[in-house]
Amino acid sequence: MGYTAFTLFGVLLQFLAVAATGTQLQERQASTCFPLNPANTVTDRLNAALNATGATGLAIQLCADTNYNITAPIKFAYPNQQITTLGFPGLDLSHRATLTVSGSRAGDGTGHTTAVDGSCANCTSVAIRYIQIVGNRAGAGPITGGANIEFGGANQNQVIEYVHSRDPRSWSCLHVAEGPFTCANTLIQNNDIGPCGTDAFQEWADGISLSCKLSIVQNNVVTGATDGGIVIFGSPGSHIHNNTIVNEGAMQLGGINMVDWSPWHGDFTGTIVENNIIQGGFATNLTNAATEEGKNADDAFIKIGLAMGARTWFGDQFGYNATIGAVVRNNVFMGGFGYVMAAAVLTNWTVYGNTIDQDVTYIGSLGPNCTKGETYPDPQPFVYNTTALTNCTMDQAFVNQDTDSLTCILPDSGDFWPWVPSVNTTTGTLPTGSGSSSTPGSSPSGSGSGKSSVVPLAVGITFGILGAIAIAAGVRWWALRQRALSRKVTY
């Protein structure tokens, strides 16, 4: 079966399963919300309800505008269970109930990290909808443990939608694990994710971490991740599309990462990454009117907008083991980056149609973790190592460079960020300003502008999205993409 048919067949199975699950859950709806009080027993009561005999299909409805401080993970136990907020859909998303991670932290760097766990052996078709998850790191360093949300395992047809997950104590805001490589058909959509982690060394965190085949990640907004906005661990046959990743308030290692050789042994067969917006940092104040560039108060930029292949991230850790079989197309980049796209050690990989917005600059110089004596490319749009590509179609203006370990770069101190007055750097709203034209390039210090002449390109995009956040995400994606396509840089 061809890759496209393989993916579409998985999608069809997924939506049939989700539809059936929705019918079952509606039959189990309660008319009252799950009581917070007594608050000191709420964790035990939630878990007892999910583990009760006959709890298959149970829908726990939390109370709107209510914060539940939980001291241990809330664990699904049977198929078709869900956790949501009473009154949704129908209420404004600001009224979603909140689960706040409040368990202890141990002196050895471990402790309570996960709010909701859907990875049990019998957790097929569980779902969380219309809730908020607060990891409650609260400025402390990370501790060892799971993500805010831990789904996947030996399960299929799970759903995470209309969820806000932020501030994880550990390494990710949302993780779907592969289990014994039987996890399949997870639907992650219409979520608002972040902030996640800090940009202090090894205190980073992902937005969405996907390691489940035949899954869909769509119409999500990831703001303020510090490791990868969306990290794809193989996940063959998955479709990652129409997401918006916004760099905000901190350095970010990657926008979308396709760099992990483990655990799928590099298998990205049939995985498609398309029509995503990746927004690097913008100037917080204008300091160079001639170039329409300025400084960013937080040195916020994305080191690699879209990274492909393990060596771009891990150097020689995985040798020349290749990542295999993905398609990366029609994504849009804007803001400040080290490299828009970087690639190394790929097989049967296709890249085309990706667009650089006019308001892009290339920022960075060697940091203390760069290996002395090694050669690193100056920041620029597209870099790859041609000696490590096999049967690949790379229809972008890639430049042949050594692309090992590119995340060691740090931002330069200077007015190198694009200035767009309408960009609110604290909320990631739509950039709509226009910039001057110049030739793309990089300076010896590793900073350059991607501003160029406008090349109009009209693209019609139709979204069929249910719910207020889906409409907002779709409109945002369409507006950003239309703007970028009409202002793209041609190389």
Image (spheres, helix red, strand yellow):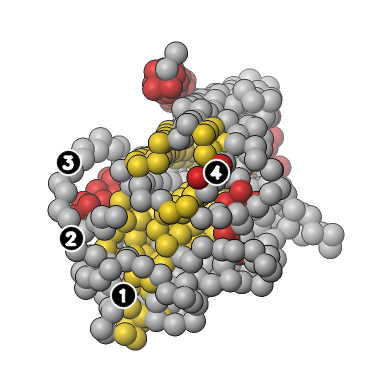
Helix or strand or loop: what does disc 2 sit on?
A: loop
Q: Circle 2 is placed at which residue position? A: 454
Depth check: give the residue in front, 51 or 293.
293
274, above or below 156, in the image:
below
Q: Circle 3 is placed at which residue position? A: 460
Q: Circle 4 is placed at which residue position? A: 387
Query: Which of the image's four quarters has the C terminus?
Result: bottom left
Depth check: give the residue in front, 432 or 474.
432
Which badge, 3 or 4, is on the more N-terminal residue? 4
Name the residue at 26% across, 63% down.
Answer: 358
Residue type of the residue flagged with mark 1 = Trp
Q: Position of residue 96 (x, y in %)?
A: 45, 50
Residue type of the residue flagged with mark 4 = Thr
Which badge, 1 or 3, is on the more N-terminal residue? 1
Q: Position of residue 310 (x, y in %)?
A: 60, 45
Which badge, 2 or 4, is on the more N-terminal residue? 4
Residue type of the residue flagged with mark 3 = Gly
110, above or below 263, in the image:
below
Cα distance in 3D space between marks 1 and 4: 37 Å
CB contact under 8 Å: marks 1 and 3: no
Q: Position of residue 94 (x, y in %)?
A: 40, 55
